[in-house]
Amino acid sequence: MAGHAPEMPIVVDDETGVWTTDALPMLYVPRHFFVNNHMAIEEEIGPERYAELLYDAGYKSAYYWCEKEAELHGMSGVAVFEHYMKRISQRGWGFFIIEDLDIEQGTARIRLENSAFVYQYGKVDRKVDYMFTGWFAGAMDQIAQSLGYNVKTQAIQTQSGAQAGCEYGVFEVSPLS
């Protein structure tokens, strides 16, 4: 399998063992380990409840990440959203492709190809990538707020590559009513 090194340095502290990328501490675990833990929690509390919990946590984390990355790299607006999609794509979650983005209106459509969750679950005829949903609203809200736009958003997954007849996932971001 051919590959390339991501354009993001990983720094490992010799004294603590902490991995850092983009000035944030990171964890490096095998995909199957993470997804198997995800599946165990889902089995215990159900995918609907787990999706709710992950949405809020993902929103908060994406908001924070975009804020810190914008400061670190001196970016704003669309460049921050594009950088976020690039970085999460480089971390093995899948390839996140922006199909539509309007920060001022609070709308976006993101396609997810090669999802880590779909690789592990296979075709189970349901949406399995819901962990990412809050990420898109958190990123959008942080960027919109930093630009002075008065919009607050929500995100939903409309399809998953794990569903019959679907080759990729789709997420939609829209303003809260």
Image (cartoon, grey):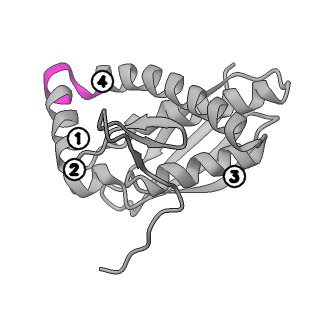
The residue beneath circle 3 is 100
The residue beneath circle 2 is 30
Is there any visible trace of residue 44 in the rendered image? yes
Q: Are marks 1 and 2 in contact (CB under 8 Å)?
A: yes
The residue beneath circle 4 is 50
Image location of residue 53, percent across then percent down: 37, 19
Q: Nearer the viewer, mark 2 or mark 3?
A: 2
Residue type beneath disc 1: Phe
What is the C-alpha distance between the residues marked 2 and 3? 32 Å
Q: Residue at x 38, y 35 (%)?
A: 131
Q: Which mark is residue 34?
A: 1
Rendered position, 169 above or below 173: below
Q: Which mark is residue 88?
A: none
Tell me the quarter of the picture where residue 77 sits. top right
Q: Nearer the viewer, mark 1 or mark 2?
A: 2
Q: Nearer the viewer, mark 1 or mark 3?
A: 1
Image location of residue 83, percent across then percent down: 63, 50
Residues 169 and 92: in front is: 92
What is the C-alpha distance between the residues marked 1 and 3? 30 Å
- Left or right: residue 22 compared with residue 42: right
Residue type beneath disc 4: Tyr
Residues 17 and 50: in front is: 17
- Left or right: residue 171 compared with residue 100: left
- Where does the magenta region start and end? 42-47
Residue type beneath disc 2: Pro
Q: Earlier in the sequence, mark 1 or mark 4?
A: 1
